[in-house]
Image (spheres, rainbow, N blue to C red):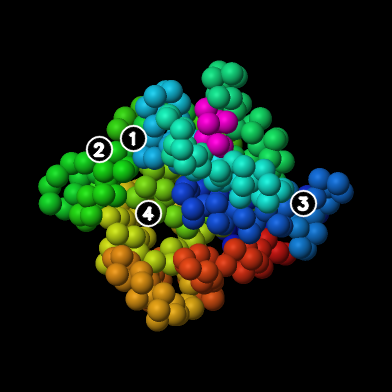
Amino acid sequence: MKKRASKSKALSPGFRVVALGGGTGLSTLLRGLKEHVIRRTDGRATAERPIADLAAIVTVTDDGGSSGRLRRENRILPPGDIRNCMVALSKDEALLGRLFQYRFHAGRGLIGHNFGNLFLAALTHVTGDFTEAIRVSSKVLAIRGRIFPSTLSNVHLVATLENGRTVHGETRITASRAPIKRLKLSSRRVRPLPRAVEAIKEADLILLGPGSLYTSILPNLMIPEIAAAIAKSKAPRVYVANLMTQPGETAGYALADHLRAIQKHVPQRVIDFVVANRQPVSPDVARRYRSQGAEPVAVDPPALQKLGFRVILDNLLEEHGVLRHNTRRLSRLLLERFLRH
C-alpha cells in the first residue's frame, strides 16, 4: 500500500512517476528524470534507474505562436508544450530532437512554425486522433515515458484581474501584466483524458511544476477529475518551485504566495512537499532578470510550514545565459527523497 512519505515501496518492480505542467518547466524536469527510467533491454529496476513508468500530463491551453496558429487554423489542440516534452524524453535529442524543435524562418505560411508542431498536426489529421499522433510521434523519437494531454477539450483560460478586467486567452493574460485575482477555464464541461487520470491513480510519486503558475500548473488542477485523483492519491505529492517570478503572472510573489494561489483555486489538498532552490543567483544574472521584471522567488520555510507543507531545500540552480533548474541535481534529489526504501 502506498504511503504519503519519502519511503514508498520496494525497488524490484520499479516506481511509477507522474509529472504535471507545461512550458519549459515540465520539459526541464523530464529531461533529468528520463535518465532514471528502467532500461528496456533488461527491464529491471536498480538504485540508479528505479522508474518503471514516467508519465507527463501536459496542459493544452496555449493560444500563442505556432501552437496558437495551428489551433485556430487546423482545429487541433496546441502541440507546442507536448512537442517540448517529447524532445525532452527522446532517446536522441541531438538529431531528431533538433529536427522536432527546428523553427522555420522563411516561407509564406511556414515562418514561425516548428517542424515538430507541423508533424503532430499532420499526424492528427492522418490518424484522426490527437492522442494517436502523440503516440506515433513518441515512437519516432523513442521517448522514455508517456505523454498525455490533460484534456481533449478545446479549452481556453479566462482571468479576472485585480483591476476588475476580464481577460480571455493565455497570451492576453500574460501580456496584461496586471495581478491576477481569479483564473477559470472557458468551459465548465472540461473532461480529462481518462488515461491521464488513470496514470495519476497508479502513481507512486506525483510532481507539480516547475512552470508558470497560472498558465501551466493551475490549468491542469482546475479540471475537477484531475484534482480529485491527486487529492485521493496516497503517493507523495510534490510541488517543485520556480526559480524566478514571472512578469504578467507572479510579479512580487514569494513562494508562499504561489502555494496560496493554488489553495485558492483548488479546494482539495493536492500538495504535501515543496522542493525549492536555496542557491543564490549571481549578481549579474539577477540584475539582467530584474531589468525584465523578474526576481528570485523568495523562500520562507516557516511560512510554508504554517500552510501545512513540508519543505525541502537544495542547490538547484544552473546558469547558462538563462536560469534553469539543474536537471541532474533535481532528479537525483527527488529519487533520493521519494523513490528509495
Given the image, on which type of amino acid does mark 3 rest? Ile
Identify the residue at image location x=49%, y=55%.
25
> Of label 1 and label 4, which has the lower sequence position?
1
Task: Answer whether residue 120 is magenta in the image.
Answer: yes
125 or 236: which is nearer to us? 125
- Whether residue 172 is visible to the viewer of this picture, yes or no, is yes
Give, as a three-letter code, the residue at label 4.
Leu
Q: Quadrant of the C terminus?
A: bottom right
On the image, the x and y values in percent for residue 96 come to 67, 43
Q: CA distance from mark 2 to mark 3?
A: 42 Å
- Disc 1 to disc 4, how far (Cα)? 15 Å
Residue 127 occupies quadrant: top right
Asked if disc 3 and disc 1 are in contact, CB closer than 8 Å, the reply is no
User: Is disc 3 surrounded by few (<14), some (14 to 19) or many (20+) residues within 10 Å?
Assistant: many
Displayed quadrant of residue 261: bottom left
Tell me which amino acid carries mark 2. Answer: His
Answer yes or no: is residue 51 visible: no
Magenta stretch, overall SS = helix
Q: Which mark is residue 168?
A: 2
For disc 3, the marked residue is 38
- Give the residue at mark 4: 213
Between disc 3 and disc 1, whose residue precedes? 3
- Per the model, the C-alpha gap separating discs 3 and 1 is 36 Å
User: What mark, if any, has residue 156 been given in the picture?
Assistant: 1
